[in-house]
Image: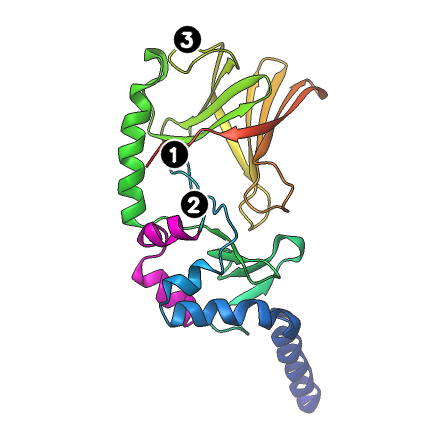
Amino acid sequence: MKHLNYILLCLSLLFTSNTFALEQKYHGSVLPVIAAFKAEDKTAIAAHIRYPLKRQYPLPDIKNEAEFINRFDEVFDEELVAVIGSSNINTDWDNVGWRGIMLNNGVMWVDTDGKVIAVNTQNTTEQAHAEKLIAQDKQSLHSSIKTFQKPILDWKTANYRVRIDNLGDGNFRYVSWSIDKSPSDKPDIVLINGNITFEGSGGNHHYTFKNGRYSYVLHVTIIGCDTSSLGWLEVYKDDKLLLSDAVISAVNKAN
């Protein structure tokens, strides 16, 4: 029995090692990224980014290598650079199917072409920039919706302009206008007490708001394919889908 237990323990350790180790075929995608961060080479890192690199609203997405190098310290502080540069290919990285390859349960994501597709952190430099943009954002809104803690998104679909704000303590607010109106106009719809649902570790999620028998659902794409939209708006009456409207653009504030 003692020998059997020892054999089972060894098999368990072997299975665990194989389960969590990144497959060899993906090493070529990740190792150059690790090397670029280990060398702290901003130009090399910029070449390993899939553009545009999404940032949290109201921060504008990073469109190209030159802009990335200029905003590098907003995205990667010394601590994060060190974490990536010293990461272990076998224990810190994991393949998550079509979503890509993630570092440390989703801190950063790389695709199979060796391009960084998402960085799910925000350091103090980026937070300061965001706070400045939030103050500017509030000045452009109708007086009835100027009070909030943090803006979450501001989207345009073919028919609507929609935004979500965090009012504090996880209380989300949905606001929408017809596409021909301005945010300085009184909103057509304002809903509060929305909830957020995450879809795995990739960052994709959706917000749901209730208005009697109607539900307004905004799906947010963080990890997707090249043809994926930023997200889409769905409106239901009970369980019947009344509207599905893809996002055409995100309204980012200028730097």
Q: Is residue 82 left or right of residue 153?
A: left
Mark earlier in primary sequence (3, 1): 1
Count of numbered labels shown in the rendering: 3
Which region shows up in magenta?
65-86
Q: Is residue 237 above or below residue 73?
A: above
Q: Mark 2 = which residue?
A: 62
Q: Where residue 37 sits in the image (x, y, percent)? A: 40, 67
Q: Is residue 62 left or right of residue 246?
A: left
Q: Quadrant of residue 210?
A: top right
The local secondary structure at tag 2 comes to: loop
Residue 85 visible in the picture = yes
- How far is the residue under mark 3 from the one under mark 1? 21 Å
Q: Amino acid at mark 2?
A: Ile
Q: Mark 3 = which residue?
A: 186
Is disc 3 surrounded by few (<14), some (14 to 19) or many (20+) residues within 10 Å?
A: some
Q: Where residue 13 sits in the image (x, y, percent)? A: 62, 79
Residue 21 visible in the picture = no
Q: Amino acid at mark 1?
A: Pro
Q: Mark 1 = which residue?
A: 58
Residue 75 part of the magenta-drawn span: yes
- How far is the residue under mark 2 from the one under mark 3? 31 Å
Q: Is residue 244 above or below residue 20?
A: above
Quadrant location of the C terminus in the rendered image = top left
Q: Amino acid at mark 3?
A: Lys
Quadrant location of the N terminus in the rendered image = bottom right
Q: Where residue 219 sits in the image (x, y, percent)? A: 58, 33
